[in-house]
Amino acid sequence: MKKQLIRTILTLFLISFSYLTFAQSGKATLILKDSTRINGFGEISGISSIVSIKFKNDSLKWRSYKSKEVIGIDILENDYYRQFRYKYKDKDKFPEILEIVSIDSLSLYVRTYSGSVLTNSFVNEPININGVDNPQTIELDNGQKINISNRPRNSYTEINFPRYSYYVGFGESDQVEHLYTKGIPFAKSFKKSMKQYFKNCPSLIDKVENKEFKNDELWKILDYYNRNCLNVKSE
C-alpha cells in the first residue's frame, strides 16, 4: 500500500513537472543591451518561472544569455516574430521574461505557464486603431516617443486551463506591474482586478460590469484605456 502511494505521488509529480516545462524555438533575433540585433536561431525554455534565452548563429555558439547581456529576443512563428523581453515585475530584484502583447502609452505583457499555450494556441491579430492603418507616433508625458504603426495584438486561446499572468508598464519601461492572473488554481477575480487598476476610468469599469470586456481580451481593455482615460499627446 505504501509503495503504491509513493508510486502515485511520483507519477503526479512527473506529470506536473512536464506540464510546467516548455520551450519555444525557431529563427530568431537576439537583442543586446546596446540594442544591437543579431540574427540566428533562438529558444525560450525553462520550468515555470525559471526561464532562459538560448541563441546561436554561424559565428556564435549555442548558449544561454542572461538579462545583464540582452534586452530580449524575437522568435519567428507562423510568419510573425513573437517578442520576448526581460522586465522587472512589481519592483522585483531580478527580471523575468514576458511576451509583448501591445506597446502603447500603457503597454501590456503576458506570462504563460504551459507549453501548449506558447505554441499551439497562439494567434496574432493585427488591429487597426480607430480605422487608421498607420497611426501616428505617440508622445508620453515624460517625453518618450513610441511609434505604434501596425502594432501587434496577441490573443491566447484557452487550452487545458493554463495560467496566464498579465502585466502593464508605461511605454517600453523595464518596470511592470501585475494586472491580472487567470487560470485554475491561480485565478483572481477579473472584475476586482480591473476595478483596482483602472479605478480612474469609470467608463471602462462600466464596460467590465456590463461584460462588454472579457477576461481573455485584455488588449481591448488596454486599447480603450489608452484612447479614453490616459492623457496622451499625439503628433
Image: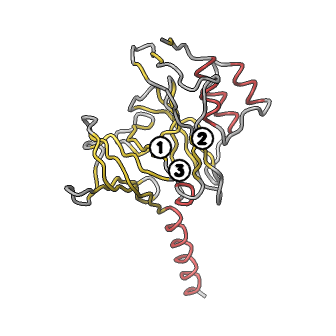
Residue picked out by circle 1: 99
Q: Nearer the viewer, residue 229 or 181?
A: 229
Q: Is residue 232 above or below residue 188?
A: above
Q: Is residue 108 above or below residue 97?
A: above
| Label located before the other in sequence (1 or 2) | 1
Q: Name the secondary structure under disc 2.
A: loop
C-alpha separation, residue under disc 3 versus residue under disc 1: 9 Å
Mark 3 neighbour density, 10 Å: few (under 14) some (14–19) many (20 or more)? many
Q: Nearer the viewer, residue 107 or 166?
A: 107
Q: Residue 163's spot in the image, x, y percent?
A: 58, 52
| Label located before the other in sequence (3 or 2) | 3
Mark 2 neighbour density, 10 Å: few (under 14) some (14–19) many (20 or more)? few
Residue contact at pointers 3 and 1, CB within 8 angstroms: yes
Residue type for callout 3: Thr
Mark 1 neighbour density, 10 Å: few (under 14) some (14–19) many (20 or more)? many
Residue picked out by circle 2: 125
Lateral position of residue 71 relative to residue 126, left or right:
left
Q: Residue 176's spot in the image, x, y percent?
A: 45, 33
C-alpha separation, residue under disc 3 versus residue under disc 2: 18 Å
From the viewer's perspective, is the residue at label 3 or at label 1 nearer?
Answer: 1
Q: Residue 47's spot in the image, x, y percent?
A: 44, 60
Residue type for callout 1: Glu
